[in-house]
Each structure stands twice: as C-alpha cells, then as structure tokens.
Image (cartoon, rainbow, N blue to C red):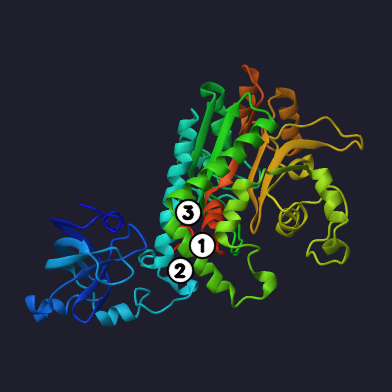
Amino acid sequence: MKRIAALLQSDPSLHEITVRGWVRSFRNDRFIALNDGSCLGNLQCVIEPENFERELLDQINIAAAVAVTGTLVESEGSGQRVELQASKVKVLAPADPEDVKKTVLSPKRHNLETLREQAHLRVRTNTFGAVMRVRAALSFAVHRYFQEKGFYQAHTPILTGSDAEGAGEMFRVSTLDPKNMPLNEDGSVDYKQDFFGKESNLTVSGQLEAETYAMGLGQVYTFGPTFRAENSNTSRHLAEFWMIEPEVAFNDLQDNMDLAEDFIKDVIAYAMKNCAEDIEFLENRLQQEEKSKPEADRSPMPLKEKLEFVLKNHFKRVSYTEAIEILKSSKPNKKKKFNYIIEEWGADLQSEHERFLVEKHFKCPVILFDYPAKIKAFYMRLNEKDKEGRETVRAMDILFPGIGEIVGGSQREERYDVLKQKMETMGIPEEELWWYLEMRKFGSVTHSGFGLGFERLVLFVTGMTNIRDVIPFPRTPGNAAF
C-alpha cells in the first residue's frame, strides 16, 4: 500500500489502488481531502455522490478514518498534480462532528497551549505533523551519521546509582513503601533494604558509562532518554528529554570540536533535504506568528536562512577568557541592558550573553572553550594554570543563533591522580564512582565527548519557540499527563 506522500509524486495510472487515512474535509458531497500523516499534503479523492448511499456520505466527516479505492488520474483542479477517482469508499472509524468541534481536530486555528492540553490529538494537525516528521528525520540522521563514521551505539543504563553531573537534581527510584519507610538509627532512610540495596535514580546522562565503552570500542555514542528533577517551568526545560552523547578514545579538545561541528551540520543538512516541505511550512507559520511580536522579540532571520547560516559558516572558536573581555566591553553590558551584568572573569554565561556573541558580535555559530574549572563538572580535563594563575578546564560549548548553548562537551580527565583530587575537592564520593576512577589505571588515554539535547536540536531546526512542542508528550513540573 502506497502512502499519500508517494502518491502525490506519482503519475496517473489505470491500476486500481486503495488509500487509507483521515478525512481533513469533505466538500459538496464530492471532494474528500484525505491525509495519512506521511506529508503535509492531502490527496483529493473525488466521488460521484449519486453512486453512494446517503447514510455513507453522512459518515464522511472530519477526523473519520476511511479507505478509498479508485484510480489515480490527472487532477482537473489547481493545487495538485493528481487526484483519486473513487469507485468505493469505506468508513473504517467514524468521528462525531459535535465531538470534533470540541477538539484541536476542528478546522479552526488553535493556540499552542490548547494543543499541548490535547497532546494525544495534536499530531493530527499540520504544525505537529510537520514537527514530528522533522524530529523522526533528525533521529534517523543521528544514527546514520555515527554508524557511517564507524561508531557503535552503547545502551547505557536508565536506572543508576551515580550522578554524572554532580548536580543532585535527580528523580529517585524506589520500591520502598512511602508510608512505612525503613529507617536507620539516625532517622535517615535505610536504602540497603531497597531493591538495589542503595539509593538509586533515573539517569541524567549516559556519559560516564559511555566513556568506559569508548575505552574498549574506540568510539561510541548514546541516544536515549535522560531525566532532570529541575523545577524550571520555562520554554527551554523538560524533566524528560533525549540526549545524544558520543565518546571517542584518543580525541583531544580540538578533535571534539571538529566532530561536533561536522555532526551538527550533517544532520541539519539531512533534515533540510528530506523535510523541505515541512520546513517550508514551519517557516511560513513562524513568520505569521511573529507578525504580532515586537521587533526585538522576533527571530533574527527566517528559519531556512538560519539553517543555511549554520551550514555555510565555520564555527568561530573563542576562548572563555576572550569572550568575557568582549562581553565586559559590550554596549549591552556597559549600559546595563543585560539581565546578568558581566563584571569579572569566572562568571557563568547566560543565554543572553551567548546569543549576543553569536548574533551581534561574531555573527556566526561560536564554540567557546577553556572555561573556569569552578563552573564546570569534575570529569573535565584540567589545563595548566594561565598566566593569571587561574584554573581552566578543556570544556567547550557550541552556541547557536536564537537558542544559545546547544552542545556541551569536553576533553575528559584521563589522569588518575588529578581526577581523584578533583572528586575529593568537589565532594564526590569515591565509593560511588570507584569504577570510573579505576578505569584510569588501565591504559587510560586522552578521550573526549559531548552532549547534545535532542529536543534543543529539533527546536532549532523546526523554528518552534517552546521545547514542549518538539517532544510528543512533554514532562514538566506539575505535568505528567498522557
């Protein structure tokens, strides 16, 4: 059975075919606009009403599922090359028009918040059909890229006893009875009686485990769900999201930057080539939406131009120290237009600073590297102190227009003694990550990797403005519906 996307590109044929899909509209008891989710376009199915029972015609309503049999002919109307001359229509599943009116399946325009409240139906709309097709294409492109480069996918644990980021914002997993928790003498919960015999959580990252596999397989990547119990009710945060994390043995920081830039450009190019119709639609949608926004809040460039901007520009590589000097002397900082004023070296950069560097100063994607050790994770490789006596690590972040940070990575600390000292200094219990530390005793080599939040990538490629609109069923504070 051919999908509608393929049929719309086909030539007329005398062979009888059957098409299945959902009714988008039914005009004059004659023209059915049928969509099966394979593309934005609908297939026009033309029926002769006198050849069908009135009872059947009355069931061909918006959202009803139907099977239409007929021949593909050259379309007499404008807007499509071909149409289906129907000889038979079967209603597979009806949809009550009164019920449809109460949902996002009704043909009127709906705001995104209403669509989120009906996440089980929103993929049937043009906007979310387009977004989810782009998401699926990007997911395929991720695997395609790494597989063609000789990477092996590593399936890292979702249930874990370690905190890769040292942030503590983790979802606890337990089989203990919350109404009758076993306690130690000091009143703390006795997790030795729990399922895993210790306190366990949902993973925030597969990086640490992936590093161990890079040390055996050379180059690996993870692509799976991660979780953060961060109470951030913003348009950029989710409690459950997908992460892409390659780890490569023998790669230093420069190699890591090269890999990240090449990877991002490749998957974006794939989406632009294979989802051209959907991206065109999303660009037009974004332009209509932004007409009502103040000039300052609009995207710096149209969607396709923004994507081409990334593909055509070499990512500018700038040290954190240089970036701080640029920001300190910038007009928004001097005039106190930034919400977070940059006063001294060591400040943790915010999205407004990152976007200024990309959109206003360099006017190209930017990779910042060599961050202060104090604001980065324990596993990042320590540099020699700079001439000011300051400690930095071989970290790197990739900054994009309209979004700020999209990738975070680093060269990992391969030296046993240095890593042990850093864990002690940052209060990370050695008994929890003994295996990660011990790995440095057995042929530990220079190695690097990065993490890319998949939803951030989808957000960028689709031009959507809220991360809740690029994942099928968003998990956010106070919301685990569906």
Q: Position of residue 258 (x, y in %)?
A: 64, 35
What is the count of numbered marks?
3
**Could you say which disc has been placed on residue 468 in the image?**
1
> In the rendered structure, which disc, 1 or 2, sits on the residue that comes first in sequence?
2
Looking at the picture, does residue 441 appear above or below residue 365? above
User: Which residue lies at the image location 49% right of the left edge and 30% below the top edge?
Assistant: 151
Amino acid type shown at disc 3: Asn
Corner quadrant of residue 318: top right
In three-dimensional space, the C-alpha distance between marks 1 and 3, rounded to whole angstroms, equals 36 Å
Could you say which is closer to the camera, residue 291 or residue 154?
A: 291
User: Is residue 187 visible to the viewer in this orientation of the structure?
Assistant: no
The residue shown at (92%, 38%) is 388
For badge 2, the amino acid type reads Arg
Disc 1 and disc 2 in contact, CB within 8 angstroms: yes
Q: Are marks 3 and 2 in contact (CB under 8 Å)?
A: no
100, above or below 301, in the image: below
Q: Residue furthest right?
A: 388
Q: Which corner quadrant of the image does residue 395 belong to?
A: top right
The residue tagged 3 is 180
- Which mark, by number, is residue 40? none
Label 2: which residue? 116
Decide which of 91, 246 is in the foreground and name it.
Answer: 91
- Asked whether 155 or 459 is in front, the reply is 459
> For this view, does 245 lie left or right of residue 351?
left
Disc 3, SS: loop
Q: Name the quadrant of the C terminus.
A: bottom left
